[in-house]
Amino acid sequence: MKKLQGLLFIVLFSVPLLFQFNFYQVLKLKTFDRFVPVGVASEYFAVLNITEEDVDREGGYPLPRSRLAEIQNKLIAQGAIGVGWVIAFPHADRLGGDADFAASMNYSRTVLPLFENDNGEYPGTVGTVILGDGAGGYIAKGTTENIAILKQTQWTDQGIASAPVDVDNLVRRIPLLYRTPDGWLAAFGTQVLKSLAGADTYVIKTNENGIEEIRVKGLPPIKVDSLGRKWVSWVTPHETTLQEMDVEGRFVFVGVTAAGVMPQLATPVGLLEPHYIQAALAESLLQENSPYIPDYALAVEAGVYLLTVGIMWALLSSLGITWGLLSGVVLFAGTTAVGGYFIQKGLLIDVTWALITQILAATVAFYLNFRTQYQLRQQIKKQFEHYLDPRQVKRLQDNPELLKLGGEKRYATFLFTDVRGFTALSESVSPEEVTYIMNKALTAQQKAVQQFEGTVDKYIGDAMMAFWNAPLNQPAHENSAITCALQIGKNIRLLNAQLQEEGLPTIAIGIGINTGYAIIGNMGSESRFDYTAIGDAVNTAARLESATKEQKVSLLVGETTVNGSSHRLKFVNEIHVKGKEKGLKVYTI
């Protein structure tokens, strides 16, 4: 039953992972946001902000293109190795400064932005080489181009400066290349590196799932997801101003931070303008072990989930509560360590859902295990509390495995008692008084059995059956049974004194004890059973009790019991009982 429950649990909670439910994707992405290490900024890039103060100083926005030409020339003069304007120029400058701005771009590498829209228009595509059977890729719906005089200068390139968002509307992954009907367009940050490297083409390596990596001449292969998206490491860039111009040896991303000019996009590190995002993308392409989501991530995540949650369920279901919890904690810690190792190595493979489900599985399995053990303890208490010593009941409740239900062969000592002259007694007093006397007599016997940790099997009218060494192992059980018989005699004598005071007849009992093998366990029908013992040793104990009348003693003990006892017993006789061909040597105290 527990295995079926575990299987149903694992299948049910695998659905969000396998079908990538939105809440699961958000959880996974938030985990990566928290634990993906942030790299250190390189010395190759800088961000130049046109601030609110700059706009006021320049007399408003947009700045004249002639003024942008001055900024471009000054940046180059200050040692910049290239400039990326993350500002669109789809229309001619009404002040006529486009020629000056275009001329300033002839002295260094310059990258202009393409912003996406739905117009279905695309510029000329870049050269690509595809290694594989084809590629998926992120599809561009159209772009807003820059005016011809600017985009056609010798050292000017264009790149898409859009930043697609994830399911939670945050920017994390940016396509390095966008697919168009005619080919491929580079992202702005990708184009920056291609321009600096002087490369002519991109190499796209594919597999059966889509894009695997993108290569640019002069750079190590860049690992991407199947859509060609790169996970952005939100490196804090080197920042400078129009007045400072600290850009020597750096490619400069120019953008506007003045209020209301450029949109701010939501990222895991807050709201950022487009030029910050493209600078972060360029930095990410240079990061060693830069993180990416491999195309086999889902398979690994599902494998980790099935393995660890299955083990967690098995541990909490099969082990005891204490060891189960300790093992579960170790498994949880190990899974966490594996997830951390993946992320530190740049593999964005999520184990968060496995960890959450482990906690849920542990909770459910712990509850079911606790409930089962509680029900077992209650069953043990209900079954044994009336004829076992409370200390023995407590031992069975604490260690149910000590009890083998269903019947087992055990070497035990059996004791039978019977009230002498019960028929005459019942005829001499009223039924109510008979009941009163018998309850008192059986209680006196039961207390003695309980005192010496025996098990009261049953009451048979005026008789009682008890045994030792079941359901728990008991050393010297022969001694315990004989000592119990002596205590029963004492208890009956005390009871007789009480009965005399009450004007009621006294009683006498016979006791038979024998030791041997018997089958002990739950016996009966499917709907009703009792914990009892059957076997020749049991029958012999009953025959010995019957023989006490003939031998004129109150106690007869079988030879096997005597051999295992340290009590000094005296030989009575060798008797013949029903069902036995050989005579039995019997003893008394």
Image (cartoon, helix red, strand yellow):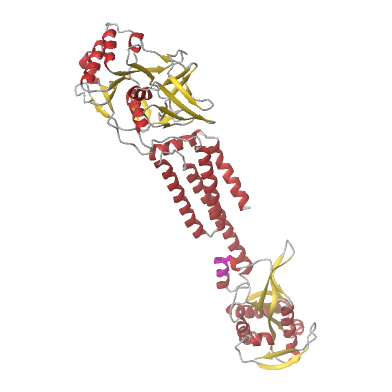
Q: List x then y, in percent, for residue 194.
A: 36, 23
**Residue name at image x 73 percent, y 61 percent:** 527
Task: Give the percent coordinates (x, y) of residue 424.
Answer: 76, 85
Do we see residue 109 in this rendering? yes
Q: Left or right of 84: which side holds 292?
A: right
Is 387 part of what is drawn in magenta?
Answer: no
Looking at the rendering, which quadrant does residue 507 occupy?
Answer: bottom right
Q: For the image shown, how many numbered marks are present on the structure?
A: 0
**Which of 204 and 515 lies nearest the eye of the viewer?**
204
* Image quadrant containing the C terminus: bottom right
Residue 282 vs 345, above or below: the answer is: above
Image vertical order of residue 257 relative to residue 310, above or below:
above
Secondary structure mostly taken by the magenta-highlighted segment of the chain: helix
Looking at the image, residue 522 lies above or below residue 443: above
Quadrant location of residue 263?
Answer: top left
Q: Position of residue 558 (x, y in %)?
A: 69, 86
What residue is at 57 percent from the left and 45 percent from the top? 10
Q: Nearer the viewer, residue 405 or 450?
A: 405
Is residue 394 found inside the magenta-colored segment of the image?
yes
The quarter of the displayed image where residue 32 is located = top left
Span shown in magenta:
393-400
Q: Nearest the camera: 228 or 371?
A: 228
Provide residue 371's location: percent of width, then percent of height: 57, 56
* Residue 210 seen in the figure: no
151 left or right of 567?
A: left
- Identify the residue at image location x=53%, y=39%: 299
Above or below for 136 versus 329 = above
